Amino acid sequence: MPNSNIASMKDLAKLAACSISTVSKALNGRPDVSEQTRKKILKIAEAHNFVPSVFGKDLKRKCTENIGAVFCRREQPLSGNPFYSRVLEGIEAESAINNYNLILHLLAEDKSKLPKMLREKRVDGVILVGVLDQVVLELVKSVQIPIVLVDPKIYVDDFNQVLIDNEHGAYQATNYLITHGHRRIGFISGDLDRMSFKQRFNGCRKALTHNRIEFDDRIVQTGGLEQGYDHAKNLMSLKDRPTAIF
């Protein structure tokens, strides 16, 4: 087993007891390297987890002009989620305006392996969108390229993030209903262990508290993104049903 990973062709050349030029030729499939030498270099590279960077092909520029977009979604396809579809459209449009190529990757269920574009540093930066976890964040962080998170669904520090102000938005929505005379306001959402739904729940409760309206958990229905109809039906079947629903 190797003692450590190697990060440069210089290190690889030292282990293979050959020149950096020979290593480069072997990695790029050049014909002027013997098959024996090529196999030897590739075997050492694999054993030490060496991945050649595309920067090595253009040392002067050190820029790929590529932006990576990694979508971390759950069961629903990307095309079936209007939120993620619009986010992708925005990333795509901004990349085009700035003459950057967009490389899209949908994260597989196996989150222990980085996308190839990150392992080989084929992008100048990466945008991570959606349902992230700490394993994914630590893996991507290890690549040491600029990272921006979009609506990560979990609480994270030390990352640039684009977030929706769910709590204040819910506060405003509930307050709007209150200003229109409603005091018995039902609440429907997905599972509250999801950050965005919990923030909306908190915003709703804050608006009620601010307006001195007692919170009633009997008119709260949560869980499941496809159960809105059933949740509303349950609320409307109550004897003392709500006059409005958020």
Image (cartoon, grey):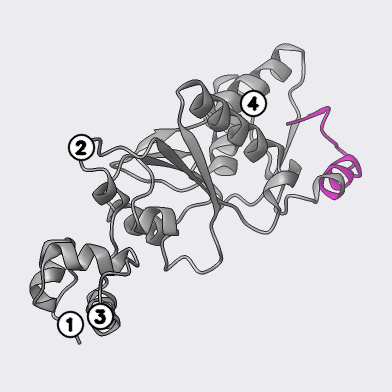
Disc 3 residue crowd, few under 14, some 14–19, many 20+, Cα 10 Å: some
Q: Which amino acid does the dot numbered 1 rest on? A: Pro
Is the C terminus in the top left, top right, bottom left or bottom right quadrant?
Answer: top right
Left or right: 49 in relation to 68:
left
Between disc 3 and disc 2, the foreground one is 2
- Of callouts 3 and 2, the N-terminal one: 3
What's the distance in space between the residues labelled 1 and 2, CA to CA? Answer: 32 Å
Circle 3: element type: helix
Circle 4: element type: loop
Is the N terminus in the top left, top right, bottom left or bottom right quadrant?
Answer: bottom left
Q: Which residue is mark 1?
A: 2
Q: Which amino acid does the dot numbered 4 rest on? A: Ile
The disc placed on residue 60 is 2
Q: Which residue is mark 3?
A: 47
Q: Position of residue 9 (x, y in %)?
A: 17, 62
What's the distance in space between the residues labelled 1 and 3, CA to CA? Answer: 6 Å
What's the distance in space between the residues labelled 1 and 4, CA to CA? Answer: 65 Å
